[in-house]
Image (cartoon, rainbow, N blue to C red):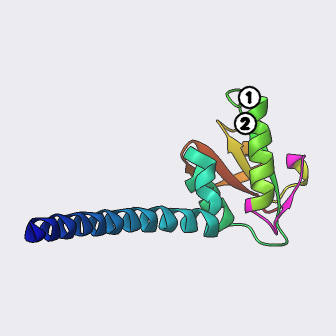
Amino acid sequence: MLAACLAAFLAIVAFGGLEAVRYAEALDDRRATALVYRTDPVETAGETATAYRRFRSEVDASTRFALVYGPGIDRHGRGFHRLFAGYYLYPAIAVGDPDEADAIMVFGPPGAAVLDAFERIDVVDGVWLGRRRAA
């Protein structure tokens, strides 16, 4: 009887230990994911994350940039991109008018005025990236 109780106790302790290890591993995975977002929040930009990452490599503290939106971007999307770009691309300077910008992100196809004033850097995930043409 004592041996059966001892065996049952050891089985319960072993099972509990295995569950604790599995739980700790799951927490480690979630912690690693949280740390990635904390150190590089660009993933919160969703499908445009790669475009932001690429554009960030092109701008510096003296760069003035503008965002231009195609007809498919609603006011909520525009607000998100305006806030996110100001934060993520800092210390580059956000300007509201593309005529004042050194670099530009166009969400959608660029218009003729953009193509005349800016040369293409890249097109990433449907986002057109450009730099002002040299005068």
| Most common secondary structure along the magenta stretch | loop
Secondary structure of residue under mark 2: helix
Image point (82%, 72%), residue name: 61
Image point (29%, 64%), residue name: 16
Task: Identify the mark at residue 74; answer none if there is no mark.
Answer: 1
Task: Identify the mark at residue 4; answer none if there is no mark.
Answer: none
The answer to whether residue 42 is magenta is: no
Which stretch is magenta?
88-98
Q: Which picture quadrant has residue 88?
A: bottom right
Residue 119 position, x and y percent, is 69, 54
Residue 20 position, x and y percent, is 35, 66
Q: Estimate how packed mark 1 is, as few (under 14), some (14 to 19) or many (20 or more) residues with alpha carbons within 10 Å.
A: few
**Is the C-beta separation of discs 2 and 1 under 8 Å?**
yes
Image point (77%, 38%), residue name: 78
Residue 130 position, x and y percent, is 69, 54
Q: Quadrant of the C terminus?
A: bottom right
Secondary structure of residue under mark 1: loop
User: Mark 2 and mark 1: span between their CA atoms?
Assistant: 5 Å
- Residue 113 at least partly seen: no
- Residue 18 at least partly seen: yes
Which residue type does callout 1 highlight?
Asp
Which residue type does callout 2 highlight?
Gly
